[in-house]
Image (cartoon, rainbow, N blue to C red):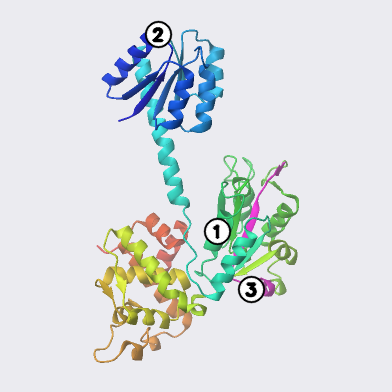
């Protein structure tokens, strides 16, 4: 039940409003002056305030200003017997939801109250959802490499220094970038991610800097680029080693001058952006090969953070696996499963070419296919879901985590087969919902469609 406070020095108005609102099943309190009204606002949870403007002890505009200073999301509806357009405009500028003249029209009053309450609910829900969406996972582990990364983040995040994060695919570079943002002075601003490898070279400049209407054939309207979207926050350039030369030159200029120009435009636009970049490539080798600009490398690499592969910090696997297990079980609404000691040792023995991302997928597979306690036999059985099962009477360790290697002519053939089976598994799990599957495995939908075509995957009838 919504709780409404009426602040008005006329008893007749208070009684009328109370009667109308209580009839509509609202909980109503009233006071006859602004001072008491403000105290009540400060000390109680309210959903809406109806406040008179002309009062003796404290003007309604003061109640509005001071009330919103304490509770900025609380809707105010101002009421007055001397309503003018100027008064309504002033109330709106100070943050009032709406303005109603005395005597209030019954229908308009109830509609305005309902809309104001709905707006308040939407504001609250939006904040809750933003907190859920923006919640950043912890960097799990206590290995020396992870302790060094956490210490570097704590030192570097509060500064404006640019950071270059290196490491293999799936090792957690994005998570490091998000913590650099979360612990910076820009945490209240946006963090905008651009996957440079997933955007065609002919579109990367438009993606980063935006474009003007008519600047090229398909530019039917103006577009704001990622640099402008990240204004006041952080721009995360993932896989920057795959960026085209022309885009590299424009990014370098943007870093040097803090200005960008949209494609097809002439106006320079100032941007206040902190750039964090990441790559799985050796950029120094790419510079030698002529694929990456040395001056851009030096602009980006004020601070270097290397995220080691999972095989170099296997002691972190137990805590990471258990954390994934708790999260995934919660998502599926099932009791939390546990790993026995043998299962943990088995997980440590795997090669983890896909790093943290592969470990999470493995844990999810084990949760779905194993019993309450996950054993070492489960780990080796489901490590390669397309391969044969474990051989009875032989220890899993003796068989090795991946079997029947001889059928693959090359490492690439093995990777393609593993990728095919993985995508097929995820598509079937999501009932062939391509958008959901793309989000689930963290690739763009267009990229997933190309993979489906590449491997000839079709939905089972």
Residue 75 appears in view: no
Q: Is residue 76 above or below residue 417?
A: above
Say which residue appears at 45% left-offset and 61% top-offset. 442
Disc 1 crowd, CA 10 A, few/some/many (<14, 14-19, 20+): some
Residue 399's x, y, as percent? Answer: 34, 89
Residue 261's x, y, as percent? Answer: 70, 46
Disc 2 crowd, CA 10 A, few/some/many (<14, 14-19, 20+): few
The numbered disc on residue 282 is 3
Residue 109's x, y, as percent? Answer: 37, 17
Instruction: Give the alpha-carbon distance from disc 1 to disc 3, as whole Å.
Output: 23 Å
Q: Is residue 17 above or below residue 346?
A: above
Residue contact at pointers 3 and 2, CB within 8 angstroms: no
Q: Secondary structure at mark 1?
A: helix
Which residues, given as a range, are shown in magenta? Answer: 268-286
Q: Is residue 136 left or right of residue 207?
A: left
- Of tags 3 and 2, which is closer to the observer? 2
The numbered disc on residue 121 is none
Q: Nearer the viewer, residue 81 or 425?
A: 81
Say which residue appears at 45% left-offset and 42% top-offset. 127
Of callouts 1 and 2, the N-terminal one: 2
Q: Is residue 295 above or below residue 114?
A: below
Q: Secondary structure at mark 3?
A: loop
Q: Is residue 239 magenta?
A: no
Q: Secondary structure at mark 2?
A: loop
Q: Is residue 273 magenta?
A: yes
Q: Is residue 58 left or right of residue 160?
A: left
Total marks in image: 3
The numbered disc on residue 103 is 2
The residue where tag 1 is placed is 179
């Amino acid at each position: 039940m919504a709780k409404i406070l009426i602040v008005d020095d006329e008893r007749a108005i208070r009684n009328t409003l109370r009667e109308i609102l209580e009839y509509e099943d609202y909980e109503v309190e009233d006071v006859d002056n602004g001072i008491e009204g403000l105290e009540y606002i400060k000390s109680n949870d309210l959903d809406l305030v109806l406040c008179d403007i002309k009062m003796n002890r404290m003007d309604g505009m003061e109640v509005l200003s001071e009330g919103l200073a304490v509770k900025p999301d609380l809707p105010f509806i101002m009421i007055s017997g001397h309503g003018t357009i100027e008064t309504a405009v002033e109330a709106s500028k100070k943050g009032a939801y709406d303005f109603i003249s005395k005597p209030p029209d019954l229908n308009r009053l109830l509609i305005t109250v309902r809309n104001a309450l709905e707006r308040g609910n939407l504001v609250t829900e939006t904040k809750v959802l933003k907190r859920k969406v923006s919640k950043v996972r912890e960097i799990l582990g206590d290995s020396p490499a992870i302790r060094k990364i956490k210490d570097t983040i704590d030192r570097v995040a509060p500064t404006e220094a640019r950071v270059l994060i290196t490491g293999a695919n799936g090792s957690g570079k994005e998570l490091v970038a998000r913590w650099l943002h979360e612990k910076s002075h820009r945490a209240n601003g946006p963090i905008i991610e651009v996957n440079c490898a997933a955007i065609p070279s002919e579109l990367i400049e438009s993606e980063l800097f935006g474009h003007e209407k008519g600047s090229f054939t398909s530019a039917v309207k103006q577009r704001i680029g990622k640099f402008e979207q990240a204004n006041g926050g952080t721009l995360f350039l993932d896989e920057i080693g795959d960026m085209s030369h022309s885009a590299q030159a424009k990014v370098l200029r943007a870093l040097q001058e803090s200005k960008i120009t949209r494609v097809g435009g002439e106006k320079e636009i100032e941007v206040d952006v902190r750039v964090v970049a990441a790559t799985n490539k050796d950029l120094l080798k790419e510079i030698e090969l002529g694929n990456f600009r040395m001056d851009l490398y030096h602009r980006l690499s004020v601070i270097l953070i290397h995220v080691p592969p999972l095989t170099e910090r296997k002691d972190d696997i137990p805590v990471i696996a258990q954390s994934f297990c708790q999260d995934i079980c919660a998502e599926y609404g099932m009791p939390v499963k546990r790993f026995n000691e043998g299962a943990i040792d088995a997980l440590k023995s795997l090669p983890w070419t896909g790093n943290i991302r592969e470990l999470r997928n493995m844990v999810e597979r084990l949760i779905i296919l194993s019993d309450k306690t996950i054993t070492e036999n489960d780990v080796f059985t489901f490590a390669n879901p397309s391969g044969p099962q474990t051989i009875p009477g032989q220890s899993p360790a003796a068989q090795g985590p991946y079997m029947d290697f001889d059928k693959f002519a090359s490492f690439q053939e093995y990777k393609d087969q593993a990728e095919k089976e993985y995508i097929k598994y995820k598509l079937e799990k999501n009932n062939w919902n391509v958008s959901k599957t793309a989000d689930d495995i963290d690739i763009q939908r267009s990229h997933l469609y190309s993979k489906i075509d590449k491997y000839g995957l079709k939905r089972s009838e």
